[in-house]
Amino acid sequence: MLAHRVRSLSEILTDRAREAGGRSGETISLIEGLCGAAAQLAQRVATPAADGSLGDYVGAANSDGDHQRLLDIVAEELCQKAAAGAGVGPYLSEETDGPLTLVRGGRLALAIDPLDGSSNIAVNGVIGSIFAIFPAPQGADRDPGLAFAQTGRGVIAAGFFMYGPQTRLVVSVGAGVDIFALDPASRGFVLMEERVRLPGGGREFAINAANARYWREPVRRYIDDCLAGADGPRGENFNMRWAGSMVADVYRILGRGGVFLYPADVRPGYERGRLRLVYEALPMAFLVEQAGGAATDGDTAILDLSAAKPHQRAPVILGDADEVAILRSLHMTPQDQFPRTSRLSVAG
Ligand code: P6P
């Protein structure tokens, strides 16, 4: 009887890239490099700092004004080193002021949020690293920003690492989504689920409901109908989750369906929501579409968006394709057709 040989991450992703008809060698080498960085980061996350400092602020702020924590800096250094080691040319991180060129002539561009959800460190919550890989366009050596002005349809591969009870990698090279888990002993990633499909019919929404008074009508109406449950127009009860960590919410949605919303709202600075287009919204939209779901900013599919500025924000509605379609329809509805009755106060 043939021993069951466990296929490696590289073998699996090479097969997937072949299916997708893409250039695979460099892409998979980069993903493997990021796996190495994630394994080191997972160890740092899991190791109590003697002085409890990993979640402490380091006194600096990133380009968007987010106060940087020690682990943000550690994650950025590990990811940037892995990217350079894999020959990445254009590089954009939430922690860099703007796009950089790591290796001149590098044929791949990497957009990354090295540590998303770092406010959860101090409460031992789930945090993650989110990335998207693009081809480096002509002229990127002169202007690395060109690589990140592409629409999401240019994404070659995307994924996220989730540092939770287990460290998991959710990744796609354009032929479906696979989930790997870090084996702390070998520091290798082993396949856990292949060709993941987002289950339909999930009656669970993820949104920070504390912002309800800032929402615009379409979001208020959708959430209102979810809250009305079996007594309302949906005719079914809904559950709510909000992890405060996008990787945790998206990972759950890939497993049991539902929808995630970080919409635009009327707060100053939140006209385009909170999440960044290039290294948060685009990679998550790529993964969710690859798993049979959908992702929109309310008007346009997120993968059809391109960034005018590297750290540009975008409203994000993603998950179950039917729920996303309902939300998009509400966004297309003329405002004067919304009833004023609401369980939620609403911005003008
Ligand atoms: P709020 C984490 O800071 C993050 O970027 C996402 O991971 C998460 O979904 C969102 O912001 C949480 O935002 O406003 O609820 O703290």
Image (tube, rainbow, N blue to C red):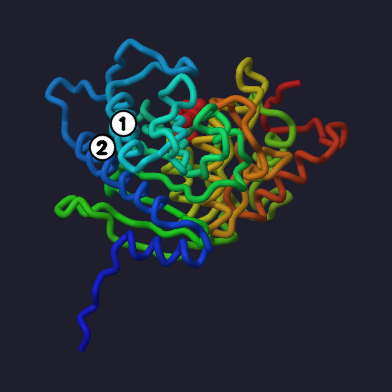
**Position of residue 295 in the picture relative to residue 95 (left or right):** right
Tell which of 12 and 347 is nearer to you.
12
Residue, x 45% and y 26% (percent of image)? 100
Where is residue 174? Give x, y as percent.
52, 57
Callout 1, which amino acid? Ala
Q: Residues within 10 Å of mark 2 (few under 14, many from 20)?
A: many
Q: Which residue is mark 1?
A: 75
Q: Earlier in the sequence, mark 1 or mark 2?
A: 2
Residue 282 is tagged as none
Where is residue 304? Give x, y as percent.
67, 43
Tell which of 139 and 90 is nearer to you.
139
Q: Which residue is mark 2?
A: 41
Callout 2, which amino acid? Leu
Instruction: Find residue 318 and report its image quarter.
Output: top right
Instruction: Find residue 268 and report its image quarter.
Output: top right
Where is residue 51? Give x, y as percent.
15, 20
